[in-house]
Each structure stands twice: as C-alpha cells, then as structure tokens.
Image (tube, helix red, strand yellow):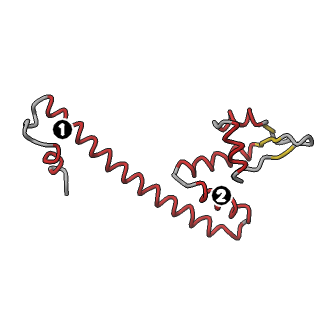
C-alpha cells in the first residue's frame, strides 16, 4: 500500500498550522517535504508525526536554534543519539523549572483572590495588607 501524500494546504489543516508556518519551518530546515515530478511539495504520514514532535518540543519552550540543532543531529544519524538525548533532558529540566515557577505564581494569585474574598466578606480585617496575609503562607 502506497503511503498517503498530502499537499501543503491539506497537510497544514492536518497538523494545525498555516501553510505560511510550514514554509517557514521548511526555510528553517525543520521539515523537508518531498517533491513530485512537477516539483510540487507534498507531505506524508511520517511528516505528520515529525511535525507533531516538533510542536511538542516547541511547546516545552525549546528555542528555534535548539530545534535546528536537534534536526541537524537527527539527520546525522544514530551516532548522535546520546547528544540528542542530552539536549532533550536539558529541555525537560528547563520545562520542569518553568512549570514550578508558574505553579508558584499561580499559588500567589490564588492567595490574592482569597485575600480579596476575605476583604469582601470581612473575614480579613480591613487593616490587614496582602503582604501581611501572604506571610501566613511563607515557610
């Protein structure tokens, strides 16, 4: 059974990106579409999986230059697996740190909302500042 081929518009819809973005990714070397006998680009099911993985990497905060480096290492073959793994491990560590920081910010926002609720229902004294209220939650 022949692999399915997708023209850029159809492929863009399948992966949730614009044709413009796909062309940009192509210009940056992140994806390499095939070309038919007339030079028209097409994509395959394998490309869908690859773009999906690129979007996961991008979603973790991986920068464009890091993505490009990863793609170059991948193209170089299995001899770069250890280096690619190390890159992904660092991206994972950085993303986990970003998540922890975001969780801390959300916790402070939650306390601020609770403080406002306490001011509204008068369960927090009028004179108590948010700073003083927040001190109750500090280690």
Quadrant the N terminus occupies: top right
User: Going 62% across and 64% down the picture, which residue do you hit?
Assistant: 84
Whether tag 1 and tag 2 are in contact, CB under 8 A, the answer is no
Quadrant the C terminus occupies: bottom left
- Left or right position of 69 against 120: right
| Quadrant in the picture for residue 37 | top right
Q: Position of residue 111 (x, y in %)?
A: 23, 42
| Quadrant in the picture for residue 117 | top left
- SS category of the residue bearing label 2: helix
State the residue position of label 2. 68
Point out the residue furthest to the top here: 121
- Seen in the picture, residue 11 relative to 133 is either above or below; the reply is above
Q: Earlier in the sequence, mark 1 or mark 2?
A: 2
- SS category of the residue bearing label 1: helix
Q: How many marks?
A: 2
Circle nearer the viewer, 1 or 2: 2
Q: Residues within 10 Å of mark 1 (few under 14, many from 20)?
A: many
Q: Which mark is residue 22?
A: none
User: Going 52% across and 59% down the picture, which residue do you hit?
Assistant: 91
Q: Residues within 10 Å of mark 2 (few under 14, many from 20)?
A: some
State the residue position of label 1. 115
Q: Position of residue 100 (x, y in %)?
A: 37, 53
Q: Position of residue 101 (x, y in %)?
A: 36, 53
- Seen in the picture, residue 73 relative to 7 is either above or below; the reply is below
Q: Position of residue 93 (x, y in %)?
A: 46, 61
Point out the residue furthest to the right here: 37
- Left or right position of 39 against 18: right
Disc 1 from disc 2: Cα separation: 46 Å
User: Going 63% across and 36% down the picture, which residue do you hit?
Assistant: 16
User: Going 55% across and 55% down the picture, which residue do you hit?
Assistant: 62
């Amino acid at each position: 059974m022949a692999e399915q081929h997708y023209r850029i518009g159809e492929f863009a819809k399948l992966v949730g990106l614009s044709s413009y973005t796909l062309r940009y990714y192509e210009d940056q070397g992140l994806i390499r579409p095939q070309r038919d006998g007339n030079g028209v680009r097409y994509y395959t099911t394998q490309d869908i999986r690859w773009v999906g993985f690129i979007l996961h990497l991008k979603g973790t905060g991986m920068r464009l230059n890091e993505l490009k480096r990863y793609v170059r290492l991948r193209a170089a073959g299995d001899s770069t697996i250890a280096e690619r793994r190390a890159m992904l491990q660092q991206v994972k560590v950085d993303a986990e740190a970003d998540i922890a920081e975001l969780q801390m910010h959300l916790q402070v926002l939650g306390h601020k909302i609770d403080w406002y609720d306490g001011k509204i229902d008068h369960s927090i004294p009028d004179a108590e500042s948010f700073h003083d209220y927040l001190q109750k939650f500090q280690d």
